[in-house]
Amino acid sequence: MATDMYAQEGNLKPQDRLGQAAETVKDESQSVAHLLGELVADAQHLVRKEFELARTEVRQEINKAQQGAISLGIGVGVLAMGGIMLLLMLVYLLADVFTLELWISYLIVGAVLAIIGTILLLTGRSRLQQIDPKPEATIDEVRKDAQWLKEQMPSGKK
């Protein structure tokens, strides 16, 4: 019985061991390539999520701007309606009660309406000034993600 000594001992022939070693190196390089591919895919996913967060923040700021504009519009409308009604009623009331000339009554009523309108306009402007156009949460998340990516890179590539 002519059996091979490698077969009897259960060992592999040197050329077989060399082939397995080459396959192991090939598998490891594919593993590294696979890991790098996953890292790139994760980074792309992360960037998409950051853009979604930025879009959400911008929408929130736009809603704040709309609320400020609505407040300004309501203020202007109230100012106009109040001006008309008060000018018609109060002017004649002042003229009758205090025996003022009609133009003095108009002056008093107009000044009061101007003060009220100014207060409403300043309130609306104050609300509009509170709007922050920068997406702060997104900027913070991008900084954190960039730091995390730096930490994930092999030490030679930092």
Image (tube, helix red, strand yellow):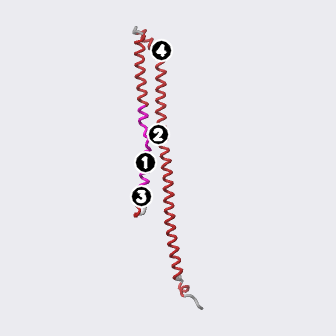
| Residue at which label 2 appears | 61
Q: Which mark is residue 88?
A: 4
Q: CA distance from mark 2 to mark 1?
A: 15 Å
Q: Quadrant of the C terminus?
A: bottom left
Name which residue type carries label 3: Lys
Q: CA distance from mark 3 to mark 1?
A: 17 Å
Would you say 15 lies left or right of 125 here? right
Q: Which mark is residue 139?
A: 1
Residue 133 in magenta stretch: yes
Q: Are marks 4 and 1 in contact (CB under 8 Å)?
A: no
Q: Are marks 3 and 1 in contact (CB under 8 Å)?
A: no
* Disc 1: CA contacts within 10 A as few (<14), some (14-19) or many (>=20): some
Q: Nearest the camera: 29 or 53?
A: 29
Q: Which residues are magenta?
A: 125-152
Residue 65: x percent and y percent?
47, 36
Q: Which mark is residue 150?
A: 3
Q: Residue at x 43, y 61 (%)?
A: 153
